[in-house]
Image (cartoon, rainbow, N blue to C red):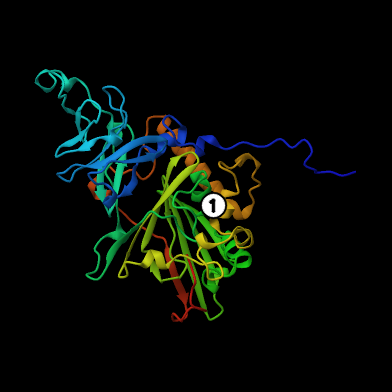
């Protein structure tokens, strides 16, 4: 008798407490307790733009005096969108009846009312605090009384004279759309899955990274004060070991060193920022002497960039996008069969659940900063060669 067939299969369900990000959702409230990058600083201009972050539709602009603002788009007067508003010295003017709001939502003017609005100070346009740092606009979307400091990261401090900060919001790695059209958690968990690298990025799609990265590593995992870390050891056959350290830091940071295996602490960090439950962006900041550094990291598929592949080539040469998107718009997590090599995934999920409980109980999640002395965050991720004197890599990389 046949057994184990698909007859009567009942589909599983997502771990929505972890995957969903809207207001009031369990992990959505965790995400709102941290500053989130929402746009490149250069994109905030006197022309308002729509941005969607954590399920909220918002309007971003910069006043003529250079101050960025992030407001709810629906004007509190009669509901016209501030996307069509006109930006002025102190704020934005609604196109419908001309009410003016500053970057913190104060109503400055109601031109159709006597004396420009005798009671304009009684109303306020909903807004979120924003700051600029590392070439990005950051927003805090959580409870005002819990607002932390915007952290800094040691890898971006004290640039050399010939170094610059490079900002990218055009996807990551081996390609994919600028807006990734599936649940953000499918990508963030992937950071703590080093075993997919020698399979997906080497055996299946050709050696997209260096030959060293095609070796199956011995991996250990550990919790850190701010997330989860994997330590991947590869014996290189020349008396050296490669110790590669990858981190996820809460609530949504990815600390992945270059697969081109530049030695030492990584020079780049990414933020996996959900737009909603089925779309997200990745904001990456790097320091380097070459302004094209991040573009040159992108891998090719038999010499072609991801966007130039035909449908059959996407099937034959799958990358991160194909593997993660094919899990579904939101993966059915209860169908997963986690094994020993998925220890990092299980640790992330347990730590996410712990932060949900902390926030629901009125506490603070890990890694939020309230003291200037703790503001600079130490990054441990990187590529570290041990053993014999450092020798050339096995071959030049062709990589993400």
Identify the residue shown where x is 20% and y is 31%. Answer: 101
Residue 310: give x, y in percent of width and height.
58, 60
Residue 255 image-quadrant placement:
bottom left
Q: Residues within 10 Å of mark 1 (few under 14, many from 20)?
A: many
**Front residue of this view, candidates 214 and 307:** 307
Identify the residue shown where x is 46% and y is 65%. Answer: 298
Identify the residue shown where x is 15% and y is 24%. Answer: 111
Residue beneath disc 1: 344
Locate the N terminus by quadrant: top right
Residue 257: give x, y in percent of width and height.
43, 63
Q: Secondary structure at mark 1?
A: helix
**Front residue of this view, candidates 225 and 3:** 3
Q: Residue furthest left?
A: 115
**Front residue of this view, candidates 8 and 240:** 8
> Can residue 195 be seen in this snapshot?
no
Residue 159: give x, y in percent of width and height.
25, 65
User: Could you tell me how many numbered marks the image carries?
Assistant: 1
Identify the residue shown where x is 49% and y is 36%. Answer: 20
As drawn, 164 above or below 225 = below
As drawn, 191 above or below 143 = below
């Amino acid at each position: 008798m046949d057994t184990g067939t698909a007859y009567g299969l009942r589909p599983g369900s997502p771990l929505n407490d972890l995957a969903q990000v809207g207001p009031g959702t369990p992990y959505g409230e965790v995400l709102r307790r941290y500053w989130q990058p929402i746009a490149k600083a250069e994109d905030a201009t006197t022309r308002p733009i729509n941005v969607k972050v954590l399920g909220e539709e918002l309007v971003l602009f910069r006043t003529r005096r250079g101050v960025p603002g992030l407001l709810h788009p629906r004007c509190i007067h009669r509901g016209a969108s501030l996307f069509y508003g006109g930006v002025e010295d102190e704020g934005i003017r609604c196109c419908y009846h001309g009410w003016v709001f500053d970057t913190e939502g104060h109503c400055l003017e109601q031109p159709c009312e006597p004396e420009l609005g005798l009671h304009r100070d009684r109303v306020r346009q909903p807004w979120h605090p924003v700051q600029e740092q590392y070439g990005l606009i950051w927003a805090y979307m959580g409870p005002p009384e819990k607002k932390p400091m915007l952290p800094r990261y040691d890898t971006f401090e004290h640039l050399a004279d010939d170094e610059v900060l490079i900002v990218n919001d055009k996807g990551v790695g081996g390609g994919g759309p600028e807006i990734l059209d599936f649940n953000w958690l499918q990508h963030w968990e992937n950071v703590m899955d080093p075993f997919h690298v020698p399979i997906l990025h080497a055996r299946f799609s050709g050696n997209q990274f260096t030959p060293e990265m095609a070796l199956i590593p011995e991996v250990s995992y550990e919790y850190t004060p701010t997330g989860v870390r994997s330590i991947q050891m590869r014996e290189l056959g020349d008396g050296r070991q490669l110790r590669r350290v990858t981190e996820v830091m809460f609530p949504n940071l990815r600390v992945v060193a270059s697969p081109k295996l530049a030695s030492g602490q990584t020079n780049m960090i990414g933020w996996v920022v959900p737009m909603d439950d089925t779309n997200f962006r990745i904001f990456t900041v790097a320091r380097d002497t070459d302004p094209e550094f991040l573009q040159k990291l992108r891998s090719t598929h038999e010499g072609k960039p991801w966007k130039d592949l035909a449908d059959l080539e996407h099937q034959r040469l799958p990358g991160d996008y194909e593997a993660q998107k094919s899990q579904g718009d939101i993966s059915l997590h209860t169908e997963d069969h986690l094994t020993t090599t998925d220890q990092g995934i299980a640790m992330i999920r347990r730590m996410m659940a712990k932060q949900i409980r902390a926030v629901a109980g009125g506490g603070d999640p890990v890694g939020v900063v309230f003291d200037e002395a703790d503001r600079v965050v130490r990054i441990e991720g990187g590529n570290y060669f041990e053993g014999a004197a450092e020798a050339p890599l096995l071959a030049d990389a062709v990589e993400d």
